[in-house]
Amino acid sequence: MKKNIIIYIAVVGLISLLSGCKKDETKVVMLTNPVAPTFKTLPDLTLQRVNGINMLKFVGTPVDPGFVASATYFLEADTAGNNFANAFTILSGIQDTAFNITVSDLNGIFLKKFPADKVSAVDIRIRAVLTADAGTGVAPFTYNSEVRTANVTIYGLPRLDLINSGITQKIESALGDGKYTGYVKLDADKPFTLKDPDANIVYGDNGGALAVNGSAIAVDASGWYNLQANTVALTYSKSAYMIGLIGSATPNGWNTPDQKMDYDAKSGTWHINIDLIVGEIKFRLNDGWAWNLGGTPDNLTQGGANIAIPEAGNYTVTLTIIGGTTGTYKIVKN
């Protein structure tokens, strides 16, 4: 198991001013100058593979708007000086939640946005989204911390290239320890092998195990898979990982099969171009409800609310999965 890099966005109880004698007289009183979240500490972000399981801490303070509210916090980053025009979420969670991430996972997130083995100037902030208690009629509020700029050094990853899979793709080793993983698109008609381009070694199958110069690896059904390989223990596994859309707005309604999305390894996002009608959608894994995401554009959660499609048309839908169980999405009409 990896140790945890604990990212604490320290959240304490919000100081509240909620008054009223009768139910229909309940009022929310906003502070004249609401207190935005702040950073207390920002760690050294010179990331190195050898320190992949070490711990870092991002520590912040809570937002205080002056009324009882639930808060969701987002640790966000963007290229320095870009005013968060292309902000991406590192982690998110509700108040009183500690965020856990490893150095290798943080490195993987930054690799999708910045070049490897170089120093990049990155702006980082904490964004708090507040919702007043039910019945108050107060819309959500957003408060941003001050921006902290850090020099981030990101390390490149050893890889195994998929040979003869039909497209150029790879799996990577976050810690450089011979353990490789990644999402790959496999074709049932195109068995593949794995090549280490640095050592010029080709791996394949040998009775379900990984072997040097082994046979091509096949799958029964075409689609996206989570592929893992261990070149030290000589093992591998492949499990279906097919993210799709379901709902009354989709061609199949609430029936399977879902409308399958494609994965972009560079950006770390899932996407689909699709015709939708007025209705609702959700995101699911492998046509099942054990894993499903719903909610708002910047706060998808497991089992969250259905997402409304108010107008029929052709859309590009983009999904970012954060920490495996939350995420964000964009729906753009073409």
Image (tube, helix red, strand yellow):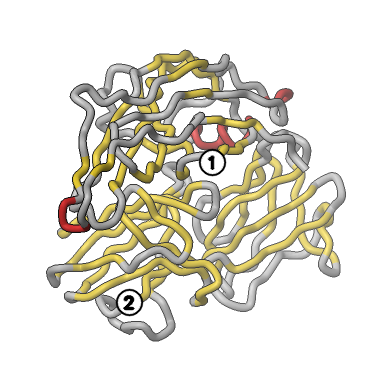
Q: Which mark is residue 150?
A: none
User: Percent position (x, y) of residue 5?
Assistant: 64, 31
Q: Quadrant of the C terminus?
A: bottom left
SS at circle 2: loop
Mark 2 neighbour density, 10 Å: few (under 14) some (14–19) many (20 or more)? many
User: Percent position (x, y) of residue 312?
Assistant: 14, 72
Q: Answer left or right for 175 relative to 101.
A: right
Residue under the image location 26 percent in, 69 percent down? 274
Q: How many marks?
A: 2
Image: 118 above or below 217: above
For discs 2 and 1, the disc positioned in front in the rendered view? 1
Residue under the image location 31 percent in, 70 percent down? 281
Q: Answer left or right for 62 relative to 47.
A: left
Q: Pointer 2: what residue?
A: 247
Q: Pointer 1: what residue?
A: 97
Three-letter amino acid code at disc 2?
A: Gly
Three-letter amino acid code at disc 1?
A: Thr
Residue under the image location 23 percent in, 28 percent down? 31
Check whether the beta carbons of the residues at disc 2 and disc 1 lie within 8 A of each other: no
Residue under the image location 37 percent in, 70 percent down? 245
User: Percent position (x, y) of residue 300?
Assistant: 40, 55
User: Which sits in the foreground, 244 or 221?
Assistant: 244
SS at circle 1: loop
Q: CA distance from mark 2 to mark 1?
A: 31 Å
Q: Give residue 260's quadrant in the image.
A: bottom left
User: Which sits in the foreground, 48 or 34?
Assistant: 34
User: Which sits in the foreground, 254 or 65?
Assistant: 65
- Compare marks 2 and 1 and give the one earlier in the sequence: 1
Image: 95 above or below 77: below
Residue at the far front in the pictured view = 21
Mark 1 neighbour density, 10 Å: few (under 14) some (14–19) many (20 or more)? some
